[in-house]
Structures are given as structure tokens and as C-alpha cells.
Image: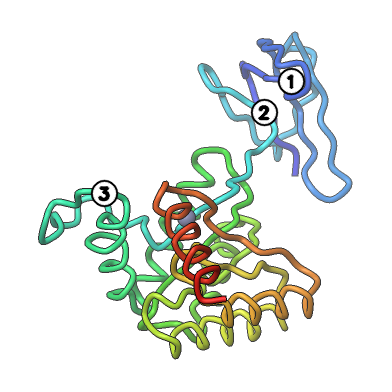
Amino acid sequence: MTLILKNAIFIDWKTLIFKQTNIKIEEGINGSFQFFDDFSKIEISKKDEVLDCEGKLVTKSFAVGHHHAYSALARGMPAPKRNPADFVEILKYIWWNLDKNLDKNTIEASAMATAIACAKAGSTFAIDHHASPNFIEGSLDIIADAFDKVGINHLLSYEISDRDGKQKALRGLEETDRYLSQHQGLVGLHASFTLSNSTLNMAADLMQKYDTGIHIHVAEDKYDQEDSIRITIKELLSA
Ligand SMILES: [Zn+2]
């Protein structure tokens, strides 16, 4: 299919030069694009689609390096039962309350809303960090299906954590193993302060098994460093 973007402002992503132009695009794996400063010079056939891009910016698509699709429907939800005083309370009273309430339908709706929002904002790829402690098995496939439907490429990960107990951590590892055996993705870990050494070791084994990477929050808040120092001191004292 041929697409003609009329009156676009094109941003060259290498030079960051903006220019007003018209762009003729041939879609597909062997696709191409050509610039025409003069619109009347473009040969247009009846089946070509012409889009008026007046006031729109055209550039290479963006990638989202860290997403939590499950939070897409959080806007407008009721206030938490108490006003969080710090980062850990924001997690406890907002996000760890929301994630426990996710089920198949809300994961799917959140993933669809996220994928559509990505596409509308010009992003065609996202790395997602998913948590739904009461609906773990198969959760990553639900997100993958929603992203695929919209056409957003992805690297998904389940946010493994000991914050809801050892069993949930093991099931997070299992979901990761199951998903990575069929898809490209990442080993997701929440943050060092909610992970035990044994969970970390099992996550590292999975990373090696699938020759992939770890996706984790690092020093998102000073609590992370303080907790690491506390544990290190405790280990030194007991050695
Ligand atoms: Zn995150």
C-alpha cells in the first residue's frame, strides 16, 4: 500500500532538523519513503491513501523502555485508605493494592488501553513490567495478545517479588519460565528490597537459561539503598 503524508513536519532523528514536506511511503518489509517538497510533483493513483498531516510531526517511532501496562486504568480510581507519606507507602497503599485486584479482564483491558495509548503517542515498542499476584499464570500471554492486536512490539516480564510471600515469588518465576520458553522477553524483578537471595539466584538461572536480561527497579527511592546497607551490616555482624 502507498501512503502519502501531505503537509507534514518531518523531524530527522539524526540531525533533529525540522522541515515542512510531503512524504510518499511504500509499506511492507521492502518498503521505502521519498520526500517531495512540492506536493504537485507526486504521482498519486486512486488506491493510494493521502493523509493531511497539517500541524503534525512525523519522525521515527519511539520505544518505551519501562512500562507498567496494568496501571493504565488507575487514573480516576478512588483515593487510597490513607494518604501515603513516602515511596514505600505509595507502593503499599496504591500499587500493591491495585495489582492484587487484577484479574484476566482487567489485565486485558489495561494492556489494550496501554497499547492504544502507545500507538497514539508514536511508540511502536514497549518493555513491560507486569505484576498481578492473584492472577499470575498466563498473565503475560494476555498482555502479548493485546499488544499484538494493536501492533505494538514488546519485551514482557513478570515482576517477580517476595513481597507477597515465597509461593507468589515461585509462581512469578514459573510464569517467566513458561513465557520465555515460547516468546522473547525478560526476567522481571521488582526491586532489591522485596527480593530474597534465593529468589535472586533462581532469577539469574532463568536469565542464563534463556540468554536474556533482567528488568528491575534500581535505586528508585533512597529506601532501596538504606535497605541494602541494613542487610549488609546485619550479615557482617552475624559473620
Ligand atoms: Zn516500574
Q: Position of residue 213 (x, y in %)?
A: 72, 64
Q: Picture coordinates of residue 28 (x, y %)?
A: 80, 49
Which comes before the other along the chain, label 3 or label 1?
1
Camera-side mark, 2 or 3: 3
Kind of residue sitting beneath label 3: Asp
Tell me the quadrant of the picture where the C terminus can be found. bottom right
Given contact means CB atoms under 8 Å apart, are the residues at marks 2 and 1 in contact?
Answer: yes
Mark 2 or mark 3, earlier in chain: 2
SS class of the residue under badge 3? loop
Residue at the right extreme of this rendering: 30
Callout 3: 10 Å neighbours few (<14), some, many (20+)? few
The dot on residue 135 is: none
**Which residue is denoted by mark 3 in the rendering?**
86
Q: Residue at x 49, y 57 (%)?
A: 229
Q: Tell me: residue 125, above or below residue 197.
A: above
Q: Please, what secondary structure does the residue beneath circle 1 have?
A: loop
Q: Residue furthest bottom?
A: 167
Q: Which residue is mark 2?
A: 59
143 with respect to 183 (left or right): left
Choose between 234 and 81: the one closer to the eye: 234
Instruction: Specify whether 44 is left or right of 220.
Output: right
